[in-house]
Amino acid sequence: MPQHHPILEAIERLKTRPAHAPRPIAVYDLDSTLFCTGPRNLAIARAFSEYRHELRPFVDRLEAHRMGWNVMADLQEAGFADEAILTELRHFWRATFFTDHFVKMDGVYPGTVELVHVLRNAGCLTYYLTGRDDPGMRQGTLHALESAGFPLPSEDVILHLKPTWEEDDLAFKTQVFEDLRALGEVVLAFENEPANANGFLRAFPSATVVLHATIHAPDPVPLDPGIHVLETLAGQWLQGPALQ
Ligand SMILES: [Mg+2]
């Protein structure tokens, strides 16, 4: 018996969709949903420590896969307490995190590449919807998608980045909901931010909305009932009979 799993159940429903139903869409956030930003944050801290050598021993204690939301906080937890240097690092981080160069450093969470392919093969339009900005991060994002083995933009794969860096992520994504409705039916959405996950479920109540429980911005809003919280997007279900 296949184990109860919201993604598996969504795949099962895809198999029984009427031929005339709107095109199914799977929407994926990128940062901290498909991609792990830990290596990017660590690379930024390491690059900055070239200028502030006293930071280096603390950077060396960090591990990419255990980085939190805020690299300054990670360094404080590692014992670094110079507030002036941490403030400098904060400025350096803001100038580097959202760039083509550093976005290529990201890791990939287990199972995510396989998941996107499985859902695409099951008939879903692949829609990457990200708060990464188009002017600063498109090339780096395409490079990262290709390196990791994710499907690249094509007839049934869309990459939608934020038009400006300054725009609020949730406001941007909410505006895109209308585009999604015009394209088909959102059947699955993957997010790491509770507020964004809530936005998806409120806009698309019949969709399977998954919160990948990685890291998220401070002070998260309460998660709406009905959102599926998953510690990992990997699992045996990816090779299960539902996919054959
Ligand atoms: Mg995210």
Image (tube, rainbow, N blue to C red):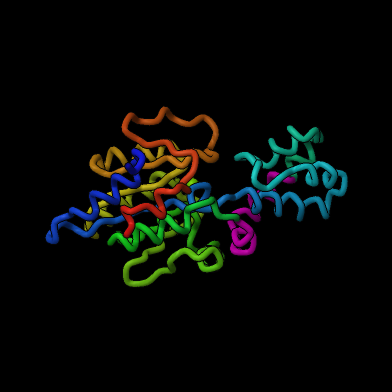
**What residue do we see at 83% from left, 55% from top?**
50
Question: Is residue 16 toward the left or the right of residue 89 in the image?
Answer: left
Q: Main secondary structure of the magenta part?
A: helix
Question: Is residue 133 toward the left or the right of residue 237 in the image?
Answer: right
**What residue do we see at 55% from left, 55% from top?**
108
Of the pair 20 and 174, the residue shown nearer to us: 20
Residue ranking furthest to the right: 54
Residue 128, quarter of picture: bottom left
The x and y percentages for residue 110 are: 53, 51
Of the pair 188 and 172, the residue shown nearer to us: 188
The x and y percentages for residue 185 are: 23, 53
Q: Provide the residue span drawn in magenta.
A: 89-106
Residue 215, quarter of picture: top right
Residue 161, quarter of picture: bottom left
**What residue do we see at 30% from left, 39% from top?**
201
Of the pair 38 and 170, the residue shown nearer to us: 38
The x and y percentages for residue 83 are: 78, 35
In magenta segment, residue 92 = yes
